[in-house]
Amino acid sequence: MAANSRSFLADAGCGEQELDANSALMELDKGLRSGKLGEQCEAVVRFPRLFQKYPFPILINSAFLKLADVFRVGNNFLRLCVLKVTQQSEKHLEKILNVDEFVKRIFSVIHSNDPVARAITLRMLGSMASIIPERKNAHHSIRQSLDSHDNVEVEAAIFAAANFSAQSKDFAVGICNKISEMIQGLATPVDLKLKLIPILQHMHHDASLASSSRQLLQQLVTSYPSTKMVIVTLHTFTLLAASSLVDIPKQIQLLLQYLKNDPRKAVKRLAIQDLKLLANKTPHTWSRENIQALCESALNTPYDSLKMGMLSVLSTLSGTIAIKQYFSSAPGAAATTARSFDLVKLAQECCYHNNRGIAAHGVRILTNISASCQEKDLLPLEQDAVFGLEALLVLCSQDDSPGAQATLKITLTCMVKLVKCRPHLSQSVVESLLTQLHSAQDNARILMCHCLAAIAMQLPVLADGILGDLMDLYKLIGQSATDKKQELLVSLATVIFVSSQKALSTEIKTVIKQQLENASNGWTAYRIARQASRMGNHDMARELYQSLLTQVASEHFYFWLNSLKEFSHAEQCLTGLQEDNYSSALSCIAEALKSYHKGIASLTAASTPLNPLSFQCGFVKLRIDLLQAFSQLICTCNSLKTSPPPAIATTIAMTSGNDLQRCGRISNQALTLSLQMKHSMEEFRNLATRYGDLYQSSFDADSATLRNVELQQQSCLLISHAIEALILDPESASFQEYSSNGTAPVESEYERRMMSVFNHVLEEVESLNRKYAPVSYLASNTCLCNAVIALLKVPLSFQRYFFQKLQSTSIKLALSPSPRNPAEPIAVQNNQQLALKVEGVVQHGSKPGLFRKIQSVCLNVSSVLQSKPGQDFKIPIDNMTNEMEQRVEPHNDYFSTQFLLNFVILGTHNITVESSVIDSNGIIWKTGPKTTIFVKSLEDPYSQQVRLQQQQGQPPSQQQQQRTAYSRF
C-alpha cells in the first residue's frame, strides 16, 4: 500500500529523500532571512506544503522554531501569516519536540505595548492549546486580556479562552465564574456577551461544572428574551448537552417547547436545527412523547419551510432505533398508542405536497417505517410508499433543476431500500422506472439507470423481454454526443449488461458497438467495456478493448488495455465448457491459460513505480494458478479412470496401513495417482491461503471486490473438501463447517450464481458420501470434474478495485537511529541494548475512510542473524532472536513507539519492521510497508581483552579484576 506513494525516509529513514527535505527547509529559511517583506511572507505561507510533504517530527520541529523566531522579531503582518500557518497545520503541532522553546519565543510578544500584537499572540496561544493546555502563564494572560479596553484584544482573548476551555479542565473551572460575571455584568456590551456565551459549551469536564453552566444558560434564556440572545444561548445549551450527554432528554424537551410556543421564525428554525443535531447524535434518547410533540407541531404549522425542517428531523429519526420505540405499544397506554400514528398521518399528507422537499421527506418516512416495522396494521403503508415514490418520480424526472435532481436522488434511494426490504414490490417499482425512462430528462435518466442497475444487482427483476425497450432507447440516445449523453450511454449499457443474465446476443453487441462508433469518445467506450468486465460479459469487453488499443497515447495505457483484452479473451474461452466432456474442458482451460499468460506479461509492462498494479497482478496470478490446479485435477481424475481400483483395495489398504492405497491398484502407478490427489488437495488449500493473503492486503478495496476474492477462496476450499470427502478420507469428512452460513444478503448476480454452484456441489458430495461407503471411484471422479466445470462456467467478475481505487491509504515509516547509507550497518556493542524508535504517518487520498478507517497500527519487529564471526560462543537460545509486536493508535495520522532490542550474538543482524493496520471492526489488514536496517553487534573492549588473555593462558591482573568489580560505580 505504501508503494503507491514516494515515501520520505522510507527504508532506512534517511538518505537522499532527507537531503531533499533539508534543502527545501533551507530554501524557505533563506526566504525568512530576506530583507524584503514579500519574500518573507511567501516563505511563511509555503510551510504547510512542506509539512504535508515531509510530515516527520525532526523537520516539523525545526520549521516551527524558525516560524517562532519570525513571530518574535517580525511585524504584525508576518505574525498574522505565522498564525494562519499554525492554524492550517494544527495536526502537526504535537510533533514539535522543543515545546518549551517554541512557546517561550511566541509568549515573549504578549508583553508588547501593541494591543494588536498581543491579540495575535493570544490567538496563537489559543491555536496551540492542544499542546500547552496546562500552561499557567498562558491562562493568566488570557484572564488578564479579558479585562482589556481594546476590543481586538478582548475578542482574541475570548477565542483563546474557548480553545483552552475545550482542552483544560483546570482552566475551564477557573474561567467559568469570570465568564459568568462578564455575561451578567451590566457594563458588558450585548455584542460581547453574544461572543462570550459560546465558551460555556466547553464546560462539560465534570457534572458539577456542566450543571452550573446549564443554570447560567437557563437564567440567560429567560432574562434576555431578544432574538439574537435566545438563538445563541439555545445553541450553546444544545452543544453543552450533546457533550455532557446526561441532559439530552431535557434539552430535547426545551427545544420542542420553544418550537411550539415561541412565535419567532428565527427561533423556531434554530430549534429545528438543534433537534436535527440531537437526532443524528443520540436518536435513542428520543421518547415517543418527543416524536409525538414534533409531529403535532408539523401538522399545525402553516409555514412550509418550518414543516420541511421538522420533517427532516422526523425522517432522520425514522431511519434509527427511535422509530421502533415510537411504534412499540406500552402496556396500559391505549390512548397513547392510538395517537402514535400521527407520524403516519403526517407522512401520508406530505407525500403529495406541492413542495418537492416536503414530499421527499414524507416518502422517506414511509419507506423507513415499511423497512423497519413488521406489524400487520402497517402493511398498507407499503403501497402508500410506492404510490408516493412513483408520483415524485414522475414529477422530478421532467425537471432539470438542481432541486429536482436532489429530490430525485432521495426518491431513487428510497426505491432501492424499499425493494431490498420488500422484494414483492420490486416488479411495480421497476415497471414505473422503465415507463418513465423514455420521457425523462437526461440527468434524471442517468440516475434512474443507476437505480435500475442497483435493484437488478440484488434481485433478478429485469426480464429478457425488457431488453427490446432498452435497446430502442439506446439507439435514440446514441444520436447525440454531449457529455450527458455519454454518461447516459454508460449507465444504460450497465443496465443492459445486468439484465442480460446470459451472454449478449449478436444483435445487442452490434447495436452497442455501432452507437459507440457514431457518438462516443474513447473514454466512454472504455467505461462501457469496464462495466462489461464487471458483469461477466467478456466477449463484449474483449471487442471494445481491442478497438481502443490504437486510441491511447501512452505505452503503459496500451499494455493495460492489451492485458484487459487478453483476460477477457481467456474468460471467454471458458464459456464453452460442458459437463461430462472433460477433454474439451482441458483444451478450453489450456487456451484460457495461454491468453492469461500473455495478459500478465502486458500487465507487468503496464505497471509503473507510482502505480505498481499490485492487486491486479496478484489477482491474475492467483487466477492462473487456480486454472492450472483445475486442469491438473481433471487430468488426475482421467488417469484414475485408466487405473481403476480393485474391489479388495480397501481391505488391502487396511492391512498394509496405507489409506492412500484404497484409491487404486496396489501398484506404483495407482499409489502415484493417489499421492497426486493429496497433492492437489494441498494445492487448493494453499491457493485458498493465498487468496486470504490478497484479501488482507486490500485495505482500500470496496466490499464487492473483497466479496469476489472471498468467493474465489471459498471455491478453492470447496474443491479441497470434495477431494478429501470423496477420495482421501471419506469416513471423517464433516459437512457442517461448509454448509451455507445463514441467509446473508446476496449483493450481485455473480455471487448468486457462485453460491448456487457451491450449494449444488456440497449436496452432491454429501449425498455420494452417505450413499456409498466407500465412494465409487467413477462417481467421485465424475463429481469432482463436474464441480470444476460448474465453477468455471460462472463468468468471472472483475470488480471495481481491479480498475478503480476510490480510497487510498498509505503508511510512511521512519526508523531511528538510521545509517547515512542504507547498506551500512549500525554498530552496537553486544552488552548493550538498541533503542529503536519507529515513527509513522498515515496518508490518505481524496476520500479518507470511504470504506474503512484505521483504528490502530500494529508494528512487528524481528531480527535475523545474517553473518557471524568465526568464533562460536555458547549463547542462551532466548538471546538469539528478537520478536516484538506493539499496537499504537495514530493521533492526527501520526504514531510513534520504541522497541528495546538485544544483540548478544556477535555479527550482522537484519532488523525488519513491518506494519499492518487494524480497522474499526478489529480486522487486521497486512498493508505494509516493510522496512529493513542492518545492525552489527560488536564485542565490548573489556570482554575482548579478557578473552584474549584467557586464550594466551594469562589470568587477568588484580587491577583489572578490581576495575571489573567497581567499574559500574
Image (cartoon, rainbow, N blue to C red):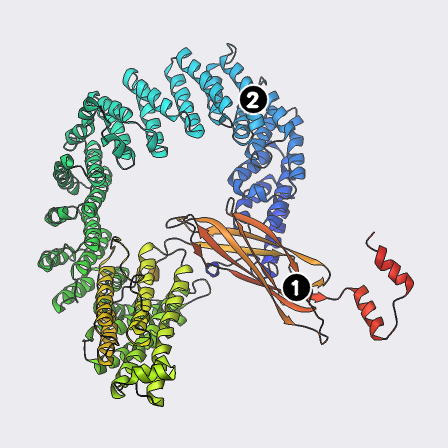
- Looking at the picture, tell me which residue is in the foreground, 592 or 902: 902
User: Label 2: how many residues lie within 10 Å, few (<14), some (14-19) or many (20+)?
Assistant: many
Q: Secondary structure at mark 1?
A: helix
Res. 52 in view: yes
Q: Position of residue 232 (x, y in %)?
A: 41, 21
Q: Is residue 228 left or right of residue 33?
A: left
Q: Which quadrant of the view contains residue 901?
A: bottom right
Q: Position of residue 154 (x, y in %)?
A: 55, 21
Q: Position of residue 14 (x, y in %)?
A: 61, 59
Q: Which quadrant of the view contains residue 169?
A: top right
Q: Which quadrant of the view contains residue 361?
A: top left
In the rendered structure, find residue 879 and report the number of the disc placed on it. Answer: 1
Q: Is residue 642 left or right of residue 686?
A: left
- Looking at the picture, tell me which residue is in the foreground, 782 or 545: 782
**Type of amino acid under label 2:** Ile
Q: Position of residue 307 (x, y in %)?
A: 23, 26
Q: Name the residue that disc number 2 marks.
A: 175
The first of marks 1 and 2 along the sequence is 2
70 in relation to 219, above or below? below
721 in relation to 230, above or below? below
Res. 73 in view: no
51 in relation to 951, above or below? above
Marks 1 and 2: CB-CB under 8 Å?
Answer: no
**Type of amino acid under label 1:** Asn
* Quadrant of the frame with the N terminus: bottom left
Q: How many marks?
A: 2
